[in-house]
Image: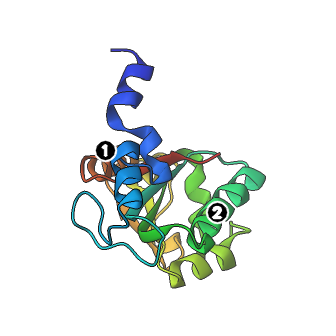
């Protein structure tokens, strides 16, 4: 199976909240108050969305753009955000390291707004970063790819942020 087939099969395009676009469209046309899974919608925002954002870049400007994507998602009045998880692996975990990140305030602010932050323990071990060095709002997961795979299996949309 090639990468395109895999990504299509895992529903990468679902991340925009367009789960079953034709069914969502029908629900909208019928003015239903719940989506096809029976989850309540919120004031015309459509079905509740659960999104996992994946960051792997160590570029500070790219990290800021990725965090701003999460902020924009939170602030979009047309999206009914139920859960947002931000998963970092490789050198991107430095966006979560106290004293080494330029984004500590933004990470804290997003966490206060409900965004969950996860750091890959494999990357931490490889890069010799301890859990105590992470911002207090960051939790760890054994592997970023495992976390992402589990969330996709649970129906989360996936966004590979810059």
Report the front residue among 72 and 86: 72
Extreme residue toward the right, this view: 61
Could you say where residue 94 lies in the image, as x and y percent from the top left? Answer: 61, 58
Report the front residue among 22 and 47: 22
Quadrant that contains the N terminus: top left
Look at the image and tell me whether residue 159 can be seen.
yes
Against 101, residue 145 (above or below) is above
Against 94, residue 79 (above or below) is below
Could you say where residue 158 lies in the image, as x and y percent from the top left? Answer: 44, 47
The residue under label 1 is: 149
Against 7, residue 94 (above or below) is below
Extreme residue toward the bottom, this view: 112
Could you say where residue 9 lies in the image, as x and y percent from the top left? Answer: 33, 30
Does residue 2 appear left or right of residue 96 in this picture? left
Which numbered disc, 2 or 1, marks the residue that appears first in the sequence? 2
The residue under label 2 is: 67
Q: Secondary structure at mark 2?
A: helix
Residue at left 51%, top 67%? 79
Residue at left 54%, top 75%? 135
Q: CA distance from mark 2 to mark 1?
A: 21 Å
Query: By what rule are the colours in the image chosen?
Result: rainbow
Residue at left 65%, top 45%? 162
Does residue 67 appear left or right of residue 146 in this picture? right
Does residue 20 appear left or right of residue 79 in this picture? left
Marks 2 and 1 in Cβ contact (< 8 Å): no
Could you say where residue 25 lies in the image, as x and y percent from the top left? Answer: 41, 51
Q: Quadrant of residue 41?
A: bottom left
Q: Secondary structure at mark 1?
A: helix
Total numbered labels: 2
């Amino acid at each position: 199976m090639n990468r395109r087939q895999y990504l299509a099969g895992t529903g990468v395009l679902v991340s925009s909240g367009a789960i079953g676009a034709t069914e969502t469209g029908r629900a909208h046309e019928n003015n239903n108050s719940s989506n096809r899974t029976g989850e309540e919608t919120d004031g015309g925002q459509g079905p509740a969305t659960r999104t996992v954002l994946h960051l792997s870049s160590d570029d500070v400007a790219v990290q800021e753009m990725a965090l701003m994507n999460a902020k924009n998602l939170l602030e979009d009045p047309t999206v009914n955000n139920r859960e947002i998880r931000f998963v970092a692996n490789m050198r991107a975990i430095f966006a979560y390291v106290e004293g080494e990140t330029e984004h500590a305030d933004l990470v804290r602010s997003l966490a206060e707004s409900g965004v969950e932050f996860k750091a890959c323990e494999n990357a931490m071990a490889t890069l010799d970063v301890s859990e105590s060095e992470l911002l207090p709002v960051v939790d760890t997961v054994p592997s970023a790819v495992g976390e992402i795979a589990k969330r996709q299996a649970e129906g989360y949309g996936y966004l590979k942020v810059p």
